[in-house]
C-alpha cells in the first residue's frame, strides 16, 4: 500500500513539473504542495535528482531558498541548471566576471522588461550584454568596422564593456532608443561556461537603481526576494567594468573600472 501511495505521489509530481512553463521555475516545496503533500519536498528533490526522463525538465525545480541547487544528481552542475533557466528566459542573480548581476536572456523581451521593473531601472538606460564570442555581435545586427574589430581583438576578453552602434529596431527593447548597445566578452571561465549554454545575457548589477550592488546572495535577496533564482558563489567584491565608447573613431572612456590599465596601455599603442 505504501508503495502505491508513493507511486501516485510521484506521478502527481511529474505532472506538476511537466506543466512548469519555459522561463519559469518552482521550488521543491511548491511542487510538493501542488502534488498534494507539501511536507514531502525532500521526496520531490530526490525524484528530480534521479530523473532521467527528458520530457521532465527538472532544471525548472529549485531549492526552497531559491538557490538553484544541484542538477542531474550533482551539486557541481548548479551552473548548468542556472544556464538552462536563463536560456529559457528565467531571471536569476548570478556571479559575473565582476560582481553579482541580475541576468536573463538578451533575446527575451518580456524578461528584459521584467528585469527593468525588478531593478527599478531607468527605462531609457540600456543594459550591458555579456557574450561568449565576438561573433555573437552579429546576432544583434552589429556590423564592426575594421578599426573597431582591431580594438576589440586587442582588449577582449576582459572586464571591459564596449558601446557599439545598433540601429536595429528589432532590439529597441535593448538599446532603449539610443541605437547603441554595450557588450562585454568576459575572461572568467565560470561565466563563460554559463554563457555558452545560455546565450547572451543582460547583466546589470544586482541592486535597485541607485543602491549598493549586492556582494552576497543574502544582500541580493533583500532586493529581489523570491522573484528570481540565485546562483551562490559566496562574497564577490570587485570593481565594475571599465566602459568605453567605440561608436566614433575617437574612443571615449565613459567609466574607469576593472582592467582600466589594460585599455589605457592598449589604446595608447594603437593610436
Image: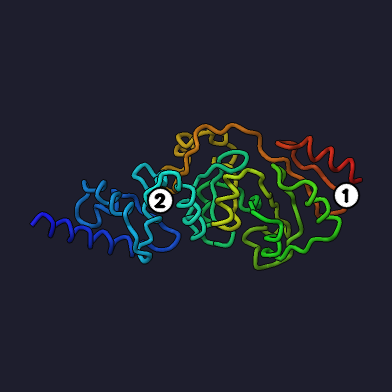
Q: Closer to the camera: disc 2 or disc 1?
A: 2
Q: Residue at x 7, y 57 (%)?
A: 1
Q: Quadrant of residue 210?
A: top right
Q: Are marks 2 and 1 in contact (CB under 8 Å)?
A: no
Q: Give the numbered dot on residue 71.
A: 2
Q: Could you tell me residue 167's position as x and y percent?
A: 74, 64
Q: Quadrant of residue 218?
A: top left
Q: Residue at x 36, y 41 (%)?
A: 65
Q: Could you tell me residue 113's position as x and y percent?
A: 54, 57
Q: Is residue 249 left or right of residue 172?
A: right
Q: Secondary structure at mark 2?
A: loop
Q: Given the current orientation, which residue lies at the most extreme left position?
A: 1
- Answer above or below: position of 235 versus 88: above
Compare residues 220 and 160 and report the one nearer the observer: 160
Q: Is residue 252 left or right of residue 210?
A: right
How many marks are shown on the rendered structure? 2
The residue tagged 1 is 250
Amino acid at each position: 500500500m505504501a508503495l502505491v501511495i508513493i507511486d501516485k505521489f510521484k506521478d502527481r509530481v511529474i505532472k506538476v513539473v511537466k506543466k512548469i512553463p519555459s522561463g519559469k521555475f518552482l521550488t521543491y516545496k511548491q511542487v510538493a504542495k501542488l502534488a498534494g503533500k507539501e511536507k514531502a519536498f525532500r521526496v520531490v528533490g530526490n525524484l528530480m535528482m534521479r530523473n532521467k526522463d527528458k520530457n521532465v525538465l527538472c532544471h525548472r525545480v529549485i531549492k526552497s531558498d531559491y538557490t538553484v541547487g544541484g542538477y542531474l544528481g550533482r551539486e557541481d552542475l548548479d551552473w548548468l541548471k542556472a544556464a538552462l533557466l536563463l536560456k529559457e528566459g528565467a531571471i536569476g542573480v548570478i556571479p559575473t566576471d565582476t560582481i553579482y548581476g541580475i541576468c536573463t536572456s538578451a533575446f527575451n523581451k518580456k524578461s528584459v522588461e521584467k528585469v527593468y521593473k525588478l531593478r527599478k531601472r531607468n527605462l531609457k538606460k540600456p543594459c550591458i550584454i555579456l557574450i561568449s564570442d565576438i561573433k555573437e555581435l552579429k546576432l544583434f545586427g552589429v556590423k564592426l568596422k575594421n578599426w573597431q574589430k582591431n580594438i576589440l581583438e586587442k582588449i577582449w576578453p576582459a572586464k571591459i564593456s564596449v558601446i557599439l552602434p545598433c540601429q536595429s529596431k528589432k532590439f529597441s527593447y535593448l538599446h532603449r532608443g539610443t541605437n547603441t548597445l554595450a557588450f562585454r566578452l568576459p575572461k572568467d571561465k565560470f561565466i563563460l561556461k554559463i554563457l555558452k549554454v545560455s546565450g547572451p545575457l543582460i547583466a546589470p548589477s544586482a541592486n535597485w537603481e541607485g543602491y549598493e550592488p549586492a556582494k552576497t546572495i543574502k544582500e541580493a535577496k533583500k532586493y529581489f526576494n523570491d522573484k528570481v533564482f540565485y546562483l551562490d558563489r559566496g562574497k564577490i567584491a570587485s570593481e565594475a567594468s571599465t566602459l568605453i565608447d567605440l561608436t566614433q573613431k575617437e574612443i571615449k572612456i565613459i567609466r574607469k573600472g576593472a582592467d582600466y590599465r589594460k585599455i589605457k596601455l592598449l589604446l595608447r599603442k594603437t593610436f
